[in-house]
Image (tube, rainbow, N blue to C red):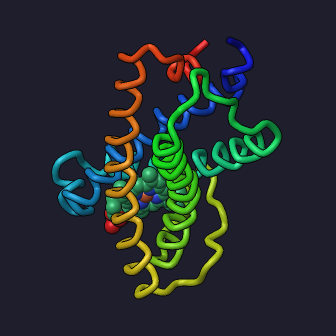
């Protein structure tokens, strides 16, 4: 069975990124729904500052982990399915996975650009990273809108992805073993 599984490093990356993305979506949608002032009124200045800081920090960590994931995937392509999947299942599953890769690399880069263009600091733990673009409020508003749409698309894809995972888990067709820990 071992050759039908992703490597341990790939499986660890999958679950670490999954936990980070859930946290990022939870904080992102909170900031979006309440806005800056509403977040300060609800949680106070200190917690609001931490929500922004850790959203940025863990977003950048997702970018780094995704780049590692792409490198590992290129070094060792996905193992074959056993039993094999139908053509339609491979197509839909493959499309969802490619969209995840694109969004989980694009979202942090977009968040970085929108934040810098808004004139805000790029916090990474207690460090400040370079902005990469100058202040440009229009660009910031546009890219934050795309960042929000990207978040909604990720949430919709997660529903499909988790739905498919539950289906495979109930079918006991070895698909969950490919990615499960340890
Ligand atoms: C996988 C990575 C990321 C995901 C899934 C994610 C998701 C989201 C979501 C769903 C929102 C709410 C929509 C919005 O306000 O536009 C949001 C807001 C925000 N994101 Fe991200 N994000 C990620 C990475 C980043 C990074 C790397 C930064 C900056 C370095 C960043 C900065 C922000 C900021 C400042 C907001 C609040 C915008 C506002 O208050 O108007 N994000 N994020």
Q: Quadrant of residue 147?
A: bottom left
Nearest the viewer among 38 and 91 is 91
Quadrant placement of the N terminus: top right
Q: Judge whether residue 53 can be spotted in this image.
A: no
Horizontal side, residue 69 vs residue 39: left or right: right
Q: Position of residue 91 (x, y in %)?
A: 51, 48
Who's the residue at 54% across and 72% down the image? 113
What is the x, y in percent for residue 104?
A: 53, 53
Q: Is the C terminus in the top left, top right, bottom left or bottom right quadrant?
A: top right
Q: Residue 71 at x, y = what percent?
A: 77, 45
Total count of labels: 0
Q: Position of residue 130 (x, y in %)?
A: 66, 67
Residue shown at the point (72%, 24%) measured from the top left: 7
84 lies left or right of 28: right
Residue in the image at 50% along x and 60% along y = 107
Residue at 53% x, 32% y: name it: 85
Residue situated in front as seen by the camera: 20 or 34: 20
Q: Specify the quarter for ligand 1.
A: bottom left
Asked whether residue 29 appears in the rendered view, the answer is yes
């Amino acid at each position: 069975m071992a050759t039908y599984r992703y490597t341990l490093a790939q499986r660890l990356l999958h679950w670490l990124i999954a936990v980070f993305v859930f946290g990022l979506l939870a904080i992102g949608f909170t900031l979006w729904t309440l806005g800056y002032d509403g977040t300060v009124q609800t949680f106070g200045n200190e917690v609001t500052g931490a929500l922004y800081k850790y959203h940025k920090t863990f977003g950048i960590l997702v970018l780094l982990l995704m780049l590692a994931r792409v490198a590992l995937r290129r070094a060792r392509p996905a193992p074959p399915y056993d039993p094999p999947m139908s053509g339609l299942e491979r197509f839909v599953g493959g499309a969802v996975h490619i969209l995840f890769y694109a969004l989980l690399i694009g979202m942090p880069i977009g968040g970085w650009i929108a934040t810098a263009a808004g004139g805000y600091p790029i916090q990474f733990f207690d460090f400040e990273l370079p902005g990469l673009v100058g202040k440009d409020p229009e660009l910031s508003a546009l890219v934050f809108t795309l960042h929000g749409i990207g978040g909604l698309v990720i949430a919709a894809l997660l529903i499909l992805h988790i739905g498919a995972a539950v289906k495979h888990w109930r079918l006991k067709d070895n698909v969950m073993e490919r990615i499960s820990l340890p």
